[in-house]
Amino acid sequence: MCDKFLYFAYGSNMLTKRIHINNPTAIRRNIGFLKNFRLDFITHSKRWGGCSATIVPTENSVVWGAIWELHGSNMSTLDEQEGVADKLYFPLMVDVHTPSGNILKCRVYQQCNNPNEHVNLCSLPKHRRPSPLYLETILTGAKESKLPHDYIKFLETIPHNEYDGEYDIGLPLKEV
């Protein structure tokens, strides 16, 4: 196994406090975008109280995110966090484009159960929406990562499911 690897985070793992819960070696190296994919939400997460993010192949779309460098020892913890063994997500190696024009090979996770229909995220049906905390974590991570303003504005249009129950994310709510 390689000593280090790059990981492209487009969801809650854009936030430093979140990724460091299970992957303490993570160092944010850059931001970038994945061409010909769109952001979507489909599979309900008990941990988050709503649907979690995925990427779906879609021509002429992009997904922005954080590029992390992790020690090889964290590949198994990242796989575990993403539910690879439970067939929630599977890892892919993708080309991520940086704002400076570089292309980096990064590990990314895609849900095994992706939506067939393309729904505009600002009008997601309630059963496919993320929870308020999950959406807030994504937005805070996007701002912390310094993603483009237009993309952050796009994320802000995504409605949440109004969940107000308990969360099991490994952090006190006030720290996210």
Image (cartoon, helix red, strand yellow):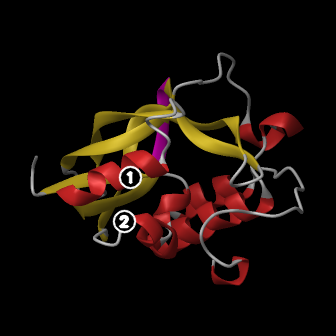
Q: What's the residue type where badge 2 is placed?
A: Asn
Q: Main secondary structure of the magenta part?
A: strand
Specify the segment rendered in magenta: 58-63
Q: Is residue 61 magenta?
A: yes
- Assign a secondary structure to mark 1: helix
Up the image or down, 155 lies above or below 24; here it is: above
Q: Residue at x 25, y 62 (%)?
A: 70
Q: Are marks 2 and 1 in contact (CB under 8 Å)?
A: yes
Up the image or down, 146 lies above or below 3; here it is: below
- Assign a secondary structure to mark 2: loop
Seen as rendered, the residue at the extreme bottom is: 174
Viewer-closest of 41 and 97:
41
Q: Which mark is residue 23?
A: 2
**Which one is earlier in the sequence, the residue at label 2 or at label 1?**
2
Q: Position of residue 176 (x, y in %)?
A: 63, 76
Up the image or down, 54 lies above or below 48; here it is: above
Residue that numbered label 1 is attached to: 78
Q: Which mark is residue 51?
A: none
Q: Position of residue 75 (x, y in %)?
A: 28, 51
Q: Residue at x 9, y 50 (%)?
A: 2
Please say whether residue 101 is visible from this viewpoint: yes
Question: Label 2, label 1: how many angstroms apart (C-alpha)?
Answer: 7 Å
Up the image or down, 55 lies above or below 8; here it is: above
Q: Is residue 85 magenta?
A: no
Please say whether residue 8 is visible from this viewpoint: no
Q: Say few, some or many: other residues with alpha carbon within 10 Å of mark 1 (under 14 / 14 to 19 / 20 or more).
A: some
